[in-house]
Structure formats: structure tokens, C-alpha cells
Image (cartoon, helix red, strand yellow):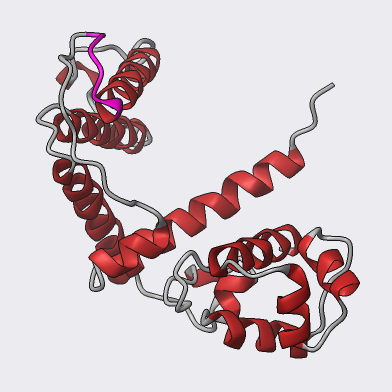
Amino acid sequence: MASDFSRTLALLRREKKISQRTAAADLGVSQALLSHYENGLREPGLSFVVRAADYYGVSCDYLLGRSMARDGSAVPVGRMDGREDAEQEKNRVVEAAALLLDLAGQTGSMQLPREVEAYLSVAVYKAYRYIYMADPAGVEAVFRASREQFEYLCDARLKQHELRIRTAAQGTAGFGLSAEELHRFPMSPNEISKRYPEQAGAFLTILQQVSDSIEALGKNVSIK
């Protein structure tokens, strides 16, 4: 979390286009101490976090890397008091997928939304088969791809769609896709919050959850 805080603190200052000296004076700390905060060399106290959040007009959750939404509205469930029920969690996934498809369509690409939809469809199929396989009474003959092969075939298909999504998102030709003139617009978490005020919470919460999980995985995996 310290790295999230230092990175975000420095980014907000640069966005505001002010010097470290000016920000330090406004926040009531020395320039040297602010530099240590921005470079992750020192951890701030709670009072500084609150002052910095007020100064930059963001929530403390955003500043601390707990939320990708600047107003702190997208804090993952595990970080909040209480638990959401399964219905709320399901709705979040549905809303996030719908927003993703809408973002793809807003680029003006005819191919990108199709590739994203196809990618999600394969993921749904693969997860379903894992659940189906757990039932000893399940009859594998209802599927054309065998139990031994489907996992590898799904992975290959997912990678193919990933490559085509990257190609379509760039508007270039290749891998069975044609070049397209795309409409570019900002897609940062902050811009998504502005563009989709009702749906952004679900989308950004999922981004934060996955970001947390892969960061934790990266810390636990050592390469020798």
C-alpha cells in the first residue's frame, strides 16, 4: 500500500502542475519530507494522509490505493465492514461486463466488441465445465471436446482472442481483422467514473480486486 500511496501522491501533484516545493508548503511539511513520501522512503501519518486527500480533492481510500475511484466509491468488499450477498456480487460482474462491452463499442470498432464478447464467452464456458466436471453424475458426452482436451483448447482460444483484442484496440489489421479508424477517448479510472457515474463503481471495484490479487500473487512468486 505504501507504493500505491507514493505513486498516487506524486501523480496528483504532477496533474495539478505544481512544484514539490509549493505542494510541501501548502501541506505543511518540508520539501525533503514530501520527496520521501513521493518516493516511498517514508510512510506518512494519518493526519498527513487526510490533509493530502483534501488538498488534491480525492478520498483517502484513493490516495492509499484502496480504490480506483477518486471518490472512494469502489472499495472491494473484503476491505469494507460487512459482507455483500451473492446477488450483489453477481450484479457487479454483470454490470462490469456490460460496461466493458460498451467501452469497446464506443471506440467505433465493429470488431473489438465482438472479440471481447467472444473472450468472455469462452471464459464462461470453461468455468461452467469445471463446475460440471465436479459432479460425478455428469455425462461428458454432452460436450464435443473431451475432458482431457477442452482445457488446452479453451486456453488456446482465449489467447487467440487476447491477441485479436489487442490488435482491434489498436485499429490495425492482422490475425483475421481489418484495419479500422477508431474514436479515441480517455479511459482512465477517473474518466470512466465521469462517463459512467452509475456503473463505474462495479467496474472499478472489479479492477481493484484483480489488481490486489495479482499484486499479492506477484509478491508470493519468487523466480529463481
Name the image quarter holding the C terminus.
top right
Residue 178: image location, x then y, percent: 15, 14
Q: Residue 9, relative to residue 59: is it above or below? A: above
**Residue at image coords 82%, 60%:** 40
Residue 44: image location, x then y, percent: 82, 77
**Residue at image coords 27%, 48%:** 185
Q: Residue 89, relative to residue 97: is it above or below? A: below
- Secondary structure that dominates the magenta span: loop
**Residue at image coords 88%, 79%:** 30
Can residue 89 be seen here? The reply is no
- How many numbered marks appear? 0
Q: Is 126 contained in the magenta span? A: no
Residue 158: image location, x then y, percent: 33, 22
Q: In which quarter of the image is residue 20?
A: bottom right
Q: What stretch is highlighted in magenta?
A: 170-175
Residue with the most extreme left position: 110
Q: Residue 190, relative to residue 214: is it above or below? A: below
Nearer-the-camera pick, 166 or 21: 21
Nearer-the-camera pick, 73 or 187: 187
Can residue 133 be seen here? The reply is yes
Q: In which quarter of the image is residue 139?
A: top left
**Residue at image coords 82%, 83%:** 45
Nearer-the-camera pick, 89 or 145: 89
Q: Residue 130, relative to residue 101: is it above or below? A: above
Residue 192: image location, x then y, percent: 32, 61
Name the image quarter holding the N terminus.
bottom right
The reply, left or right, for residue 198 in relation to residue 109 is: right
Q: Quadrant of residue 190?
A: bottom left
